[in-house]
Amino acid sequence: MRIVHYLLCWYFWFLFVVTACILVIVEPSMLLKGRAGTGSLHFTIQIAMTVAMIVATLVFAKAWWVLWHEQLPARVWCIAASVVSLVAPAIFLTLYFLGGRPAGFWQRVGFFMAPLTIGIGGILFGLTNTVEPLPPTTRPHLGHATVSSVLLLYFGVGLVSGVVWGGLQFIRHKHLPMSYFTGLGLCGFLSLATFLKLKQDLRKRRTGITSAVTN
């Protein structure tokens, strides 16, 4: 379960970076366009979206911070960030579905399946005791564990999205190219390799923490 802890930590960090970039780069131009327009409703909607983006950015940043510093309570922020991360995929999929399932609808379903799965998993994970603070002797993980966490998250999302996309394509066309299985096998191998590497790093870290506590 500690592996899930670190994966969610860096997943929220990624979402924080994305929302912060949108907030700094995209939102100012959208507000200027809305202010220059004649419709006050459009400008009000843009302000509401900017406020929502600010809230999302702060929630993701706080969730990453408390998960990174394991001495801090993280349950509430883990659940809150997971719920916020589900909002955008749910809205996009609902709009696509209500729009009559345009071309590429199922590909988008496969793309959003990974963040939906992580978001729901984050809510369930937040209900466990794994997110409770650890002893004061614990220190945030560094070095190889950080790199392994980010890589495992990247390859894991690619693997889940690839499996969902392949399943939908097989249902529609009853055939998948050999290049798909090659890419999926490579992604699965890299996911397994990074998982084992992260597990080894965390085992070493846990041994060090145990030694520090006993001494």
Image: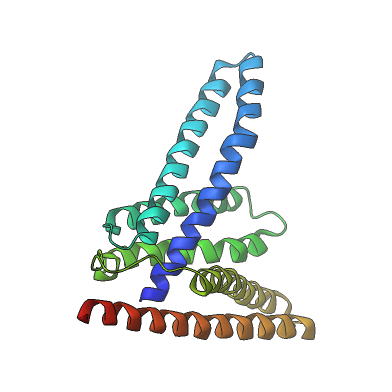
Residue 133 lies in quadrant: bottom left
Placement of the N terminus among the 4 image quadrants = bottom left
Q: Can you see residue 177?
A: no
Q: Quadrant of the C terminus?
A: bottom left
Return the x and y of residue 84 as percentages of the image width and height. 42, 49
Give left or right: position of 28 versus 125.
Answer: right
Taking the image as drawn, is residue 213 in sight?
A: yes
- Indicate whether 36 appears above or below 55: above
Please provide percent x and percent y for residue 175: 75, 83
In the image as oriented, which residue stretches furthest toward the left? 214
* Residue at 72% over, 57% down: 103
Displayed quadrant of residue 148: bottom right
For the point 39% across and 68% down, which residue is it?
Answer: 5
Nearest the eye: 148 or 188 = 148
Q: Position of residue 211 (x, y in %)?
A: 28, 82
Residue 129 horizontal side relative to residue 98, left or right: left
Residue, far front: 215
Q: Position of residue 69 (x, y in %)?
A: 35, 59
Residue appearing at x 62%, y 47% in the figure: 99
